Image: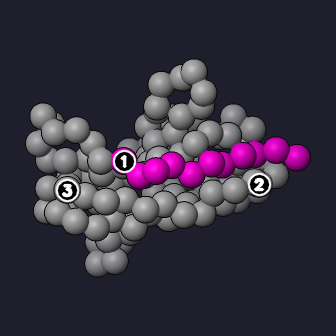
Amino acid sequence: QVELVESGGGLVQPGGSLRLSCLASGRMSKIYALGWYRQIPGAQRELVATQNTGAVTEYADSVKGRFTVSWDYAKSTVDLQMNSMKSQDTATYYCAAIPWDSRDENFWGQGTQVTVSS
Protein backbone atom coordinates (compact mmCIF):
# COMPACT_ATOMS: atom_id res chain seq x y z
CA GLN A 1 0.00 0.00 0.00
CA VAL A 2 1.12 3.56 -0.73
CA GLU A 3 -0.19 6.67 1.00
CA LEU A 4 -0.07 10.15 -0.51
CA VAL A 5 -0.63 13.42 1.36
CA GLU A 6 -0.89 16.65 -0.61
CA SER A 7 -0.44 20.26 0.43
CA GLY A 8 -0.20 23.68 -1.15
CA GLY A 9 -3.47 24.36 -2.95
CA GLY A 10 -5.34 27.65 -2.81
CA LEU A 11 -6.34 30.78 -4.67
CA VAL A 12 -3.99 32.51 -7.10
CA GLN A 13 -4.42 35.33 -9.58
CA PRO A 14 -3.99 34.79 -13.33
CA GLY A 15 -0.32 34.95 -14.20
CA GLY A 16 0.68 33.98 -10.68
CA SER A 17 2.49 30.94 -9.29
CA LEU A 18 1.65 28.15 -6.89
CA ARG A 19 3.55 25.09 -5.66
CA LEU A 20 1.95 21.79 -4.72
CA SER A 21 3.74 19.16 -2.66
CA CYS A 22 2.99 15.49 -2.04
CA LEU A 23 4.57 13.20 0.54
CA ALA A 24 4.55 9.52 -0.40
CA SER A 25 4.96 6.67 2.08
CA GLY A 26 4.59 2.90 2.13
CA ARG A 27 5.77 0.33 -0.41
CA MET A 28 7.51 2.72 -2.74
CA SER A 29 9.39 -0.18 -4.35
CA LYS A 30 6.11 -0.91 -6.19
CA ILE A 31 6.03 2.57 -7.74
CA TYR A 32 7.24 3.41 -11.24
CA ALA A 33 6.25 7.07 -11.34
CA LEU A 34 4.86 9.87 -9.20
CA GLY A 35 2.98 12.85 -10.46
CA TRP A 36 -0.11 14.98 -10.64
CA TYR A 37 -3.52 14.75 -12.26
CA ARG A 38 -6.41 17.20 -12.14
CA GLN A 39 -10.16 17.08 -12.44
CA ILE A 40 -13.00 19.57 -12.87
CA PRO A 41 -16.63 18.69 -12.10
CA GLY A 42 -18.25 16.61 -14.82
CA ALA A 43 -14.98 15.78 -16.54
CA GLN A 44 -12.53 12.91 -16.45
CA ARG A 45 -9.37 13.13 -14.40
CA GLU A 46 -6.50 14.16 -16.67
CA LEU A 47 -2.74 13.88 -16.49
CA VAL A 48 -0.86 17.06 -15.65
CA ALA A 49 2.72 15.87 -15.15
CA THR A 50 4.63 12.79 -14.02
CA GLN A 51 8.22 11.77 -13.38
CA ASN A 52 9.40 8.17 -13.40
CA THR A 53 12.25 6.39 -11.60
CA GLY A 54 14.48 7.13 -14.58
CA ALA A 55 13.83 10.86 -14.13
CA VAL A 56 11.87 11.00 -17.37
CA THR A 57 9.05 13.52 -17.21
CA GLU A 58 5.76 13.73 -19.07
CA TYR A 59 3.54 16.82 -19.33
CA ALA A 60 0.13 17.63 -20.68
CA ASP A 61 0.43 19.91 -23.71
CA SER A 62 -1.60 22.56 -21.91
CA VAL A 63 1.01 22.97 -19.15
CA LYS A 64 4.30 22.52 -21.03
CA GLY A 65 6.65 25.41 -20.39
CA ARG A 66 4.62 26.59 -17.39
CA PHE A 67 4.59 23.67 -14.93
CA THR A 68 7.52 21.66 -13.57
CA VAL A 69 7.30 18.33 -11.77
CA SER A 70 10.12 17.18 -9.50
CA TRP A 71 10.44 13.94 -7.56
CA ASP A 72 12.88 14.03 -4.63
CA TYR A 73 13.68 10.33 -4.31
CA ALA A 74 15.45 10.71 -0.97
CA LYS A 75 12.59 12.61 0.68
CA SER A 76 9.89 10.67 -1.19
CA THR A 77 8.14 13.88 -2.20
CA VAL A 78 6.87 15.05 -5.55
CA ASP A 79 6.27 18.74 -6.16
CA LEU A 80 4.46 20.60 -8.91
CA GLN A 81 5.64 24.15 -9.56
CA MET A 82 2.96 26.03 -11.48
CA ASN A 83 3.82 29.35 -13.13
CA SER A 84 1.98 31.70 -15.48
CA MET A 85 -1.25 30.22 -14.28
CA LYS A 86 -4.50 30.56 -16.21
CA SER A 87 -8.15 30.32 -15.27
CA GLN A 88 -8.23 27.03 -17.18
CA ASP A 89 -5.86 25.58 -14.56
CA THR A 90 -8.63 25.76 -11.95
CA ALA A 91 -9.32 22.21 -10.78
CA THR A 92 -8.86 19.72 -7.99
CA TYR A 93 -5.31 18.41 -8.21
CA TYR A 94 -4.50 14.84 -7.18
CA CYS A 95 -1.13 13.35 -6.40
CA ALA A 96 -0.72 9.96 -8.08
CA ALA A 97 1.61 7.00 -7.60
CA ILE A 98 1.77 4.73 -10.64
CA PRO A 99 2.78 1.10 -10.02
CA TRP A 100 5.28 -0.88 -12.09
CA ASP A 101 2.62 -3.51 -12.68
CA SER A 102 0.09 -2.05 -15.09
CA ARG A 103 -2.51 -4.47 -13.74
CA ASP A 104 -2.46 -2.57 -10.44
CA GLU A 105 -4.47 0.58 -9.99
CA ASN A 106 -2.87 3.94 -9.31
CA PHE A 107 -2.72 5.23 -5.76
CA TRP A 108 -4.28 8.64 -5.19
CA GLY A 109 -4.06 11.46 -2.69
CA GLN A 110 -7.13 13.14 -1.26
CA GLY A 111 -6.97 16.06 -3.68
CA THR A 112 -6.29 19.75 -3.21
CA GLN A 113 -8.26 22.61 -4.75
CA VAL A 114 -6.49 25.13 -6.98
CA THR A 115 -8.44 28.19 -8.10
CA VAL A 116 -7.08 30.75 -10.55
CA SER A 117 -9.16 33.90 -10.40
CA SER A 118 -8.81 37.65 -10.06
Secondary element type, mark 2: strand
Give the distance between the C-alpha atoms of the residues marked 2 and 3, in whole angstroms: 34 Å
Residue 111 in picture, x, y percent from top left: 51, 49
Residue 9 in picture, x, y percent from top left: 63, 57
Residue bearing the label numbered 2: 12
Instruction: Tell me the amino acid under the disc marked 1.
Output: Trp
In this orientation, which residue lies closer to the viewer: 26 or 73?
A: 26
Secondary element type, mark 3: loop
Secondary element type, mark 1: strand
The part of the chain drawn in magenta is 108-118
- The answer to whether the residue labelled 2 contacts the one labelled 3, judged by CB atoms less than 8 Å apart, is no
Farthest residue, direction top: 42
Instruction: Tell me the amino acid under the disc marked 3.
Output: Gln
Residue bearing the label numbered 3: 1
Crowding around mark 1 (Cα neighbors within 10 Å: few <14, some 14 to 19, many 20+) is: some
User: Does residue 96 appear to the left or right of 111 in the view shown?
Assistant: left
Q: Is residue 64 visible in this depiction of the protein?
A: no
User: Does residue 72 appear to the left or right of 44 in the view shown?
Assistant: left
Give the distance between the C-alpha atoms of the residues marked 1 and 2, in whole angstroms: 24 Å
